[in-house]
Image: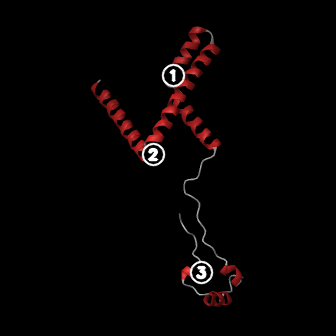
Amino acid sequence: MKLDSVPLEISGISQTEIKLELEDSNDFNLTPAIALSVQPVIADSPQKQQSVLVVFGTTFVTIFLAEIGDKTQLSTLLMSAQSHSPWVVFIGSAAALITTSLLGVLLGSWIANRLSPKTVEKSAGVMLLVISIMLFWDVFQG
């Protein structure tokens, strides 16, 4: 926690000095009563809870952009064209995406309850680095 102000008794400034400063000051119209009632103010936590709408919007945009043009969308496009039943393909692909998203959320909450956020971030970074190295290795080999 961070204190924005200190009580007058702790700050070492006497009430007489405050009265003199207030009388000498031309810039401010303060009274000693205001100066004496200064209490410590606890600053808000730097990590504020995000609103549900912000979390939903961020998740939607991230997943939407990640899924555009990927093999799942192309597979859905091809299945819809072959089956001539676009609504059945839509329902099937939507159910599959919801199921995989549910698995991701459940696994993520399970991991969050057992590991610290720093460990999760470091592990994700290492896994992405390993995947990147494997992809580069595959490109250079093939």
Q: Nearer the viewer, residue 71 or 96?
A: 96
How many marks overall?
3
Is residue 120 visible in the rendered structure shown here?
Answer: yes
Residue pictured at 59% horizontal, 49% vertical: 49
Q: Amino acid at mark 1?
A: Thr
Q: Residue at x 65, y 15 (%)?
A: 87
> Which tag is nearer the camera, tag 1 or tag 2?
2
Q: Quadrant of the C terminus?
A: top left
Q: Residue furthest top?
A: 83
In primary-sequence order, the first of circles 1 and 3 is: 3
Find residue 72 and name its label.
1
Depth order, front residue of 52/64: 52
Q: Amino acid at mark 3?
A: Leu
Tag 1: Cα neighbours inside 10 Å, few (<14), some, or many (≥20)? few
Q: Which residue is mark 2?
A: 117
Dot 2, how many residues are within 10 Å of its Cα: few (below 14), some (14-19), or many (20+)? few
Q: Nearer the viewer, residue 108 or 75?
A: 108
